[in-house]
Image (tube, rainbow, N blue to C red):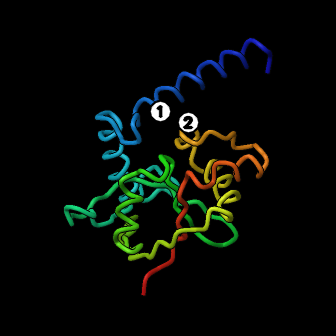
Amino acid sequence: MNQWVRARTDEVTRWLFAVKRWMYRGGRPALLARIMNRFSEIQFYAGLLAPKRAVTLEVHGRASGRVISFPVVLADYQGERYLVSMLGNDANWVRNVRAAGGRAVIRRRGRTKVQLDEVDPAARAPILRRYLAVAPGARPHIPVDRHAPLADFELVAAQFPVFRVTTAA
């Protein structure tokens, strides 16, 4: 690829990343992001035009008690499945999962009750790197290049919760 094309590609990528960060300013989805998430949620639940790792997560709201659903991407690492919060510790779904004791439902062409167990920050770095490899939409939110060494991921691991997904009994 010649330098001009690479420069334009990098410029477009920076612009798209800025737009995606704007859509989640303040750590919460703005109106456009909420609308897009709703469409993704329906698409992921139905299993249409989306990879198998794209699912809908349902969890009870910590204050309202209502079931809250939103699209997420499952990352696989060493035979396990993981959910990562691209918006960090203050994301509402993270707070709701913690308040629910990790009990949740994953929907994709059906419903599966799951238990989400938080991974210790010291063990998150390789999972975060795998997550960025399979979830391109999260790349603008995690300040590490997906090709960076694990040491770079270790520096930010405590800021991005990771949950191991197991099927509930």
Task: Give me the residue at 57% from left, 48% from top.
Answer: 135
Q: Is residue 70 above or below residue 13?
A: below
Q: Which residue is mark 1?
A: 21
Q: Answer with mark 1 or mark 2, whichever residue precedes in sequence.
A: 1
Quarter of the image containing the C terminus? Answer: bottom left
Q: Is residue 147 above or below residue 31?
A: below
Residue 1 numbered tag: none
Q: Residue 144: where, in percent of width, then height?
A: 67, 41
Left or right, 85 with respect to 23, comes to right
Q: Residue 121: where, in percent of width, then height?
A: 62, 62
Quarter of the image containing the N terminus? Answer: top right
Which quadrant of the figure has residue 14? top right
Left or right, 147 with respect to 157, comes to right
Mark 1 → mark 2, Cα distance in angstroms: 6 Å
Q: Which residue is mark 2?
A: 140
The reply to whether callout 1 and callout 2 are in contact (CB within 8 Å) is yes
